């Protein structure tokens, strides 16, 4: 059966206290919150609709530039989560498949969980399925209210809940699966008679019950996954949760993480067996690291980095958009950006690939072929190619291509003035 996703991302995100960035475009290790949600559904849905409102243009251009199958739908003004979903009704007028509804501020939910959720919906012949979980502290979430026979009754928001309802620990995760053909009419009937004066999506539960539809809850065991981000404190906590999960995955696959407490590695990084990641290393965005590498301590990989086998990226080395071929060493205090390094290359301490021209605002590439050796404290001014086996003497400022097996030095001759200091002192 066809599945389409609707992702709610129009809300203001007031509690983030940001003037420049809409909530769903805040980042966890180089990827936006909305990016996580879109990546989690893109492999098994046929189309994604992102509901946009606040900072609509920024969110629209993010979606357009990164997700070809996704459409944005404008919601103005924002009258609640039920109103937000109703914005896709014209788009899905004759659609009869499944609709998976998610929130753009819940990045930790995994693709496997969402697939299981949809399978559960199908296996129960459900018309409406809501994801729930148990929280020790359910404050701020909608509570799942059940009948005495344990079937679902309704969802009550914190602000509308009675003290008994507030004591309920089963909460609404904000993720739903709907048989669209049977549920689409509910959106015409939602009311705003609640504490917030909004059209609540949660009211489709009691609506479905009244229509004698098959309404179910899928209880998620790992409640961490539905952690929603409403503030910067939540953002930091979610980043920690995401990181812990990623590091565990790498360690299970045979990567040594010397100090998980000070190491940050993004979800979209691949790491080969027997690679060692030393403390205080930060790896964000999409990267691929080979086998038997040594990364860090205090290395920063900024995304678009491919490191082949047996490579060393050492202390205080920053790498961005670069390929480093096998058996190459970038030992200490260097910046390697927009670059391609061959095999058996050695980069001396303090080497910089000067990739950015501030006048033209252009970035250019540095190419170092196999067996190139760069002396310490050199600046390689891109665009530049250093051919196979060439050496650069320490302190070189290299502005031209260097042919194979040549030595390039830009040093002025060393002068030694004997007893110069003594003479000054005796004056
Ligand atoms: C919502 C649920 C609550 C659930 C919680 C889970 C409702 C009424 N409440 O509460 O039961 O426990 O999520 O995290 O649905 N949005 C729009 N347009 C709007 C309003 C909101 O697109 O007009 C978007 C927001 O950008 C956000 C999502 O919908 O991504 C949820 O809205 P939010 O205000 O965060 O709802 P919660 O109070 O968290
Ligand atoms: Mg929320």
Image (cartoon, helix red, strand yellow):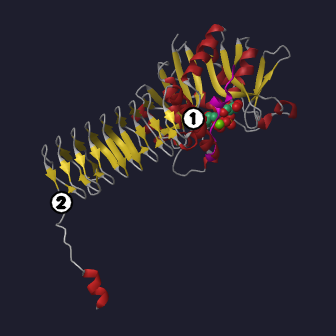
* Residue 359 spot, x, y in % from top left: 27, 57
Q: Quadrant of residue 210?
A: top right
Quick check: can you spot residue 254? yes
Image quadrant containing the C terminus:
bottom left
Horizontal and vertical percent for residue 148?
86, 16
User: Closer to the N terminus: mark 2 or mark 1?
Assistant: 1
Between marks 2 and 1, how big is the CA–CA gap?
47 Å
Q: Which residue is denoted by mark 2 in the rendering? A: 410
| Residue in the image at 36% along x and 47% along y | 331
Q: Which residue is mark 1?
A: 242
Q: Does the stretch in magenta take in 230?
A: yes
Given residues 257 and 355, the one toward you in this image is: 257
Residue 25 to residue 48: above or below = below
Residue 356 image offset from top left, x and y in percent: 29, 52
The residue positioned 40% from the left and 28% from the top of the image is 68
Please state the extent of the stretch shown in magenta in the rendering: 219-232
């Amino acid at each position: 059966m066809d599945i389409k996703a609707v992702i709610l991302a129009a809300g203001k995100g007031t509690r983030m206290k940001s003037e420049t960035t809409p909530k769903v475009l805040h980042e966890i290790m180089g990827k936006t919150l909305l990016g996580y949600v879109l990546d989690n559904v893109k492999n098994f849905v046929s189309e994604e609709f992102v509901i946009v409102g606040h900072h609509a243009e920024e969110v629209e251009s993010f979606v357009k530039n990164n997700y070809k199958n996704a459409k944005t739908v404008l919601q103005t003004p924002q009258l609640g989560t039920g109103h937000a979903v109703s914005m896709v009704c014209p788009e899905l007028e004759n659609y009869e498949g499944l609709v998976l509804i998610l929130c753009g501020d819940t990045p930790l939910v995994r693709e496997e969980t969402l697939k299981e959720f949809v399978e559960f919906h199908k296996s129960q012949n459900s018309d409406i399925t809501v994801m729930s979980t148990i929280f020790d502290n359910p404050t701020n979430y909608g509570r799942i209210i059940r009948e005495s026979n344990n079937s679902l009754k309704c969802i009550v928001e914190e602000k509308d809940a009675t003290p008994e309802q507030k004591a309920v620990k089963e909460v609404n995760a904000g993720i739903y699966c709907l048989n669209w053909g049977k549920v689409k009419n509910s959106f015409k009937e939602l009311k705003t008679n609640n504490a917030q004066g909004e059209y609540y999506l949660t009211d489709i539960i009691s609506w479905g019950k009244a229509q004698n539809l098959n309404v179910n809850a899928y209880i998620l065991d790992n409640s961490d996954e539905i952690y929603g981000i409403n503030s910067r404190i939540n953002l930091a906590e979610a980043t920690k949760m995401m990181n812990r999960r990623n590091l565990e995955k790498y360690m299970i696959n045979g990567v040594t993480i010397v100090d998980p407490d000070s190491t940050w590695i993004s979800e979209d990084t691949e790491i080969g067996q027997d690679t060692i990641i030393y403390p205080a290393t930060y790896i964000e965005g999409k990267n691929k690291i080979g086998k038997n590498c040594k990364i860090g301590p205090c290395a920063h990989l900024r995304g678009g980095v491919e490191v082949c086998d047996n490579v060393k990226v050492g202390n205080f080395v920053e790498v961005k958009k670069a390929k480093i071929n096998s058996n190459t060493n970038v030992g200490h205090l260097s910046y390697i950006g927009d670059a391609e390094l061959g095999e058996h290359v050695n980069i001396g301490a303090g080497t910089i690939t000067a990739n950015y021209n501030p006048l033209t605002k252009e970035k250019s590439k540095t190419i170092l072929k196999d067996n190139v050796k760069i002396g310490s404290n050199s600046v390689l001014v891109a665009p530049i190619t250093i051919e196979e086996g060439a050496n650069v003497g320490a302190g070189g400022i290299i502005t031209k291509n260097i042919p194979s097996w040549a030595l390039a030095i830009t040093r002025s001759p060393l002068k030694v003035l004997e007893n110069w200091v003594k003479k000054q002192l005796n004056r």
